[in-house]
Image: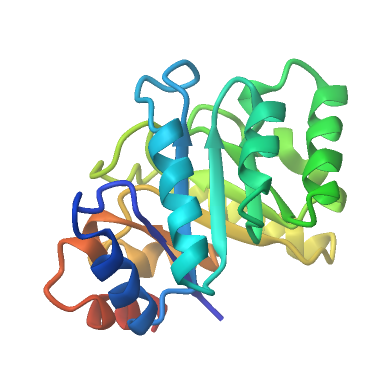
Amino acid sequence: MVEVSTSILTMEKGAEAETILKLEKAKTDYFHIDVMDGKFVEKDTYNKMREYAEYIKRISNLPLDVHLMVEDIKNGIEDFSAVEPNIITFHLEACKNEEEVHKNINLIKKANAKVGISVKPNTKIEEVYKYLPYIHMVLVMTVEPGKGGQTLLIDMLNKIKTLRKHIEVQDLEIDIEADGGINLATHEKVKEAGANILVSGTAILKAVDYKVIIEELKA
């Protein structure tokens, strides 16, 4: 089953309540919270996403899918665990060593959230293999992280295929989330490659009818 996690990064200011309720009615599976610190990636959305996450928690029962694109992962986990997210994902590239990766995994589990590890386009997917027995999801970035509305990097489809094959051979229960450039022109290829959670923001939020796009992405 394919699920959709709607990124609220480009949500229109002043229309937050309307947008969130429309997305809920359109049956998005998650609200994707793109947390950026202005260091790990150029853009800084940290405080804005904290406010949005707290606001969504007050008016919606849908799960939050928090994607930490930050250098200080420990602080990010502590700040966003307050909104009781379903998933907290951090970047492998932001960790200095294997010990730090495991510390972050354990911190997220203590916060009663599922654990996701994300990899940028230039990171080999094999680098995440050793952590698979301890986590719930791998987020494959299909664009360079840091801004919305980018075009999907086709080479990332092979990365998703390789990961899916490894998961099946090892008989693991791991979700593969793909994030970046996912729309009606690209979603079929991403699903065929093996992703079962699709992050989409611009394609959904710019649509006249969110429900139509979300249903198509899931189909």
Image label count: 0
Q: Nearer the viewer, residue 104 or 189?
A: 104
In the picture, the quarter occupied by the C terminus is bottom left
Question: Dividing the picture into quarters, in which one does residue 155 lie?
Answer: top left
Seen at 55% across and 56% down, the residue is: 65
Question: Dividing the picture into quarters, in which one does residue 196 lie?
Answer: bottom right
70 relative to 35, above or below: above
Display colour scheme: rainbow
Which residue reaches farthest front? 58
Q: Position of residue 84 (x, y in %)?
A: 66, 57
197 relative to 166, above or below: below
Seen at 51% across and 76% down, the residue is: 2
Seen at 61% across and 53% down, the residue is: 83
Residue 136 relative to residue 211: left or right: right
Residue 63 relative to residue 111: left or right: left
Q: Position of residue 1 (x, y in %)?
A: 56, 81
Q: Nearer the viewer, residue 190 or 210?
A: 210
Q: Position of residue 183 (x, y in %)?
A: 27, 62
Seen at 82% across and 39% down, the residue is: 107
Q: Position of residue 34 (x, y in %)?
A: 44, 43
Which residue reaches farthest left? 208
